[in-house]
Image (cartoon, rainbow, N blue to C red):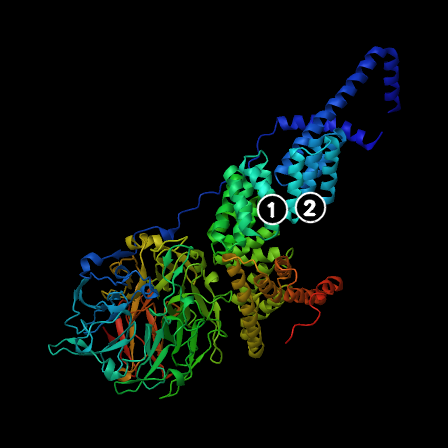
Amino acid sequence: MLRFVGRIGRAVRAHPGRAALVVVGLALAAVLGTYYYARAEWRAAQAAVREARPEEARQRLAFCRKVWPRSVEVHILSARAARLCGDYQEAEAYLSRCLELQGGANDAIQLEFLLMRTQTGEVEEVTPSLIALVDSNHPDSLLILETMARTYMHGLRYGPAYQCLNRWIAISPDDARPYQWRGWVMERMNHPARAEEDYQRSLDLNPDQPLLRLRLAEMYLEDKLPLAALPHLEYLRAREPDRADVKARLGQCRFLQGRTQEARELLMAAIAQLPDDLPVQIHLAKLDLEDSRPAEAEKRLRRVLTIDPFDTEAQYNLSLALRAQRRRAEADAAMALHDKNRALLDRSNKLLAAEAEHPTRGPDAAYEIGTALLQVGQERIGVHWLEQALQRDPTHVATHRALAEFFERKGDKERAAEHRRWAPSPEPK
Amino acid sequence: MSKDWVRLLLGSLVLATSLVTAWGCGPRNTSPAPAAPEAPDPDLQGPDLFEDVTPASGIAFTHRNGEDTSPHLAILESLGGGVAAIDFDGDGLVDLFFTGGGYFDGPDKKQIRGHACKLYKNLGNWKFKDVTAEGGLDSLADGRPWFYTHAAAVADYDRDGWPDLLVTGWGRIALFHNVPDGKGGRKFEDVSAKAGLDQGITWATSAAFADLDGDGFPDLYVCQYVNWNFDNHPKCDYDGKTPDVCPPKKFSGLPHKVYRNNGNGTFTDVSAEAGLRKGGLDASKGLGVVIVDVNGDGKPDVYVANDTVDNFLYVNQSTPGKVRLNEEGVPAGVARDGSSTANGSMGVDAGDPAGVGKPYVWVTNYEKELHALYRNDSTPDQVLFLFHTQASGIAAIGQAFVGWGTGFLDFDHHGWEDIFIANGHAIRYPTGTTRLQKPVLLRNTGSGKFKDITPRGGSYFRKEHLGRGVVLADLDNDGKVDIVVSHMNEPVAILKNVAPSGNHWLGLEPAGKDHGDVVGAMVVVEAGGRKQTRFAKGGGSYASAPDKRFVVGLGPGEKIDKVTVTWPTAKEQEWTGLKADRYYQLIEGEKEAKAR
């Protein structure tokens, strides 16, 4: 190495002019390389934002900001990527920097501010402005619709989300993403057939969406359409033969086809990596019952019920497994618990369906849905509906009481106390 | 040097590298390699299995639901009607009776009237003759017109050796006694009032006879549907805009009825003392019934297919003279599907598709539900079933069908019971599927594993229909079980079994001593190293009365080792020396089997 450096030194001394040229050349190459690399990063970041990979965009943009520290465009995109990642503080900081650089707000900065307000919950307030921009064919219409749809979807407001997605699809019918999102919304609006159509369309436009493909296969399995699920599962398995979730669903598929031996092999291969996958456990339990091994089925079903005590399918089959072992009193008790939970689930489903069909504005329906969901262990959605009730009426005592009791049970004294202020005494019996 | 400058230099190199690599990269192929072409499925190759012989048969009859006479979209229009296979004149050929349905009359079209039912005499050689009038079935007693009819059931209720006929429908049921016609033939006489069966019915669907209390006389179970009438007639739709027939969930289920046969030509409604479930919003919307001994105690048990609510399994705990039925459907695992959901159940049958000697229960269900094959895991002291649809391979047909009439049949005598299902939607304007639907033919590939071979069925199977009642009956006594389907507002279909088969068969007709009822009896045929079991049943299919005879496929072997019948009295009786490819009547207490 030293010898090599020595040889370079001698060459420089012998040919100083040529050496200077090489140095200049190298410097130029470095500058040009940097420029082209930054441009590539910029384009990749733009694509990443467009294709819903904001984390990746943030990484790429960090480099771009080094190269172009005074670029408003780069900072707007940085704000957008941060917003899409939910990092509103950072997004706001970039937007403030934009204002400094620009010496005020231009249209793009204003739009990004509006979109941030949308995403942080002020969607109602900014919707008219955003819709007006879309109506006037604003070049960022897709971005606006995407942000609004995303916000509505996060807020479980499926109707307005659906409207935004329809407009997105109308503007950009060959984009796979809005079909995927609309399918997601359709699923939640209890239109599985339309969800499947949208998912299929999304996959037709972009086949390389393994998670979506798996979800579509799962939906076909839920519809008991093994022959529709099979090509998707085989596609996934061909690409990732060791993927446990694909094996699991393929096992379910084989079970539906009556290929029980193959189903068991696949499900057993999956269970080691997915011990808490409820469908896998339930299917294996059913296979155990088929093989007249009710004690093994019981073990699996009890495991399911430790994970989800309200899984009525597991409760029902547990009762049958116990009866098959002639433990009739236990079987009857399990069936009684099943019937009770089933009634609670049916009630919450009915309330949700009624609200979806005829949305209300008052707090009572949201309160009822929230409490019904809490009763069946759907805590996240239950709390969301109770919060909806309070958005509709911040003084709704019954909702505060329900939330206070919920957070007390969870040991969250601070949040419980917040609600207890509004509902100091327990509900009268 | 700062890290940034290192990254700058590295960036230049990466850029160069990426340019070079990008040069040589085309778009990635995301599609999986095409699968190798599969070999043709031998079960789907070959000639048609059934031939539609309706046009030349002389049977030209259509059950009409009245939708063309009323704008009301009444749920009454959704049920359709059934068929009875009944050799009413004892000539050895199965005759056919069809219920007629009805229509809406009056200025507001709210008067519910009946179309006449039809009786066709089997003349042989696939020819039938309309003998409704000669057979006494062109009207009810005293010339009163037919009511709106759905179902038919057959039994020798007075044990005179001749099969009698019961017809159900809107507002009533009617019992017809098979009597001499004075010209050497037979005819029917409406004895509903005399029998005490002319009252107490609101809306009767399927019915079945069986000797429930063990006195030898067949008692009667009648399903009732829901409390619809024009005073309880809500408006419904399924897409937010198009008016349609309401679903059963909009109504309360009606209590079913069980009538004890008093042995003197009369019946007594013993529903309450027998312990039948009351109706209600979430109970008892009965459409199909089969009576069979599920737990091997010799007493026929009652399985009821209810629409959208739990199905019933009434375990028979009767004693002579006292009917007592204990409902155990839910704990026994036979009331719901494997996910604990009550289904919209319509058709029903019982058979032994896996060759284990116990009756499995088979139920056709509504769309978005699986049809249900319940494996019988019962023991003498415990009734228990397992939802076996997926493991049997039947789930592979999906959930697109609304299934009605159905039954087990071994159409090519290969030694395993296959399944036929008639399909057709219940509502007028279904979304996501069609009102008319193709039937389904499932082949038992052995040990109760099924495969959809509908395309092999023949021309009838390649078209869509509005199927309802079905009987499986050997209409030409060739040992091959034929199919008769009643549709709604579409002519009935007579499907001749033309399945090519080098296999042999044995036809059996168990008959009780002194014409006693044999529902609950079990017949075991030992041949070719296997045992095949058949069960004497009441009811079955949907709104229909299938052929009471059994056809057991023997495969290529002709030798029959032994036939054993376990009568409802728990007595066993054996026959040996029976020959293949013919029918025998096996009479309780008689040593010799009577060749037919």
Residue at the (42%, 67%) spot, across then down: B250
Q: Where is residue B114 in the image (x, y as percent from the top left)?
A: 24, 69
**Front residue of B528 and B494:** B494
Q: Is residue B189 left or right of residue A202?
A: left
Could you classify mark 2 by the number of other residues whose Cα lies within 10 Å: few (under 14), some (14-19), or many (20 or more)? Answer: some
Label 1, on which residue? A150
Q: Which chain carries label 1?
A: A
At numbered mark 2, what does the secondary structure look like: helix, strand or loop? loop
Q: In which quarter of the image is the C terminus of chain A?
A: bottom right
Q: Tell me if residue A361 comes above or below residue B361 in the rendering.
A: above
Dot 2 amino acid type? Gly
The reply to whether callout 2 and callout 1 are in contact (CB within 8 Å) is: no
For the view shown, which residue lies furthest in the left direction?
Answer: B183
Give the spatial CA distance, label 2 vs label 1: 12 Å
Q: In this view, does B451 lie to the left or right of A27?
A: left
Of the numbered discs 2 and 1, the one sitting upstream in the chain is 2
Label 2, on which residue? A86
